[in-house]
Amino acid sequence: MIDNPKGNFKFAKGSGPYSSGAVAHDGYEVVRVIFNPLSKLWDAFDIIEKHLKALNRPLHALCGMELRIPEALSIEGFNEFNQPYIDRLKEWGTHVDGLNPVARTNVAIAVNPVTAPSVYGFSYTIPSDHKGKTFVIAGAGELRSSNLSGSEIVSRGDTSTEGLRAKAKQVLSIMDRRLDSLGVTHADITQSNIYTVFNIAELMEDTIVPALHEAAHHGVRWHFARPPVIEIDYEMDMRGVRSEITLAG
């Protein structure tokens, strides 16, 4: 865990484009905002800046981003997409000791996709007397490590029920590790999201829902979408928040 005193949260180190997750300091809470309609990526940065300024919150308070892209990308395309995104956050001065503290989910909607990179939502911290833990966990696909190479993909190319089960178990184990690293539990989760275009109905009863423990009381949101990198088939993210706001994109 790395402290971000200017943003009033701690974060778990992730890969270059994002952290693995963020949890608010005591005396603060994470608030989630969604756009309706979605906002184009670079317009969203301007809206986020104005929104935080209106709340008298620093840009450092940004702790989560939820992106939507037109289609899944090659590894090379994914890295190319990430660079201007990372550069914009660096311009805001949000990095801590050279690390990006902002957790992120980035997926490609499969039906009626966006026509350009867009923002579905974002999260930030505000002062609060809430005594519970509020947090956001970044999206993760079925990789054995942060290396995006094909050899690291669990059940690569296998979208049978058993292949998907192996993928789901891998992602659930990543979610559990991230929960542990943030010092939160399944009881703190208010929303669990799955991103895949493959049929996971058979996995719900015996694999996915039991692994969520108390969080299963809130159900699971299944987004018919693809993870951002070609060949990755299953992704999840999680959050625990009290407040959710909708803004016009």
Image (cartoon, rainbow, N blue to C red):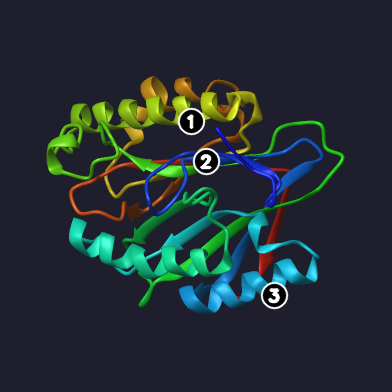
Task: Give neighbour class at mark 1: few <14, some 14-19, many 20+ (Cα, 10 Å).
Answer: many
Q: What is the x, y in percent for residue 181?
A: 52, 27
- Contact (Cβ within 8 Å) of mark 2 with mark 1: yes
Asked whether 114 or 137 is in front, the reply is 137
Local secondary structure at mark 2: strand
Mark sitting earlier along the chain (2/3): 2
Left or right: residue 125 versus residue 160 is right
Asked whether 101 or 240 is in front, the reply is 101
Q: Please tell me which residue is depicted at 39% across the width and 25% down the height of the picture.
A: 173
Q: Please tell me which residue is depicted at 55% across the width and 73% down the height of the picture.
A: 44
Label ID, residue 160: none
Q: Please tell me which residue is depicted at 49% across the width and 77% down the height of the picture.
A: 42
Asked whether 27 or 3 is in front, the reply is 3
Residue 216 higher or lower than 31, as above or below: above
Label ID, residue 178: 1
Label ID, residue 21: 2
Quadrant in which the C terminus is drawn: bottom right
Q: What is the x, y in percent for residue 232?
A: 23, 46
Give the residue number, with chain letter if any, for mark 3: 50
Mark sitting earlier along the chain (3/1): 3
Give me the C-alpha separation between circle 2 and circle 1: 7 Å
Residue 240 appears anywhere in the view:
no
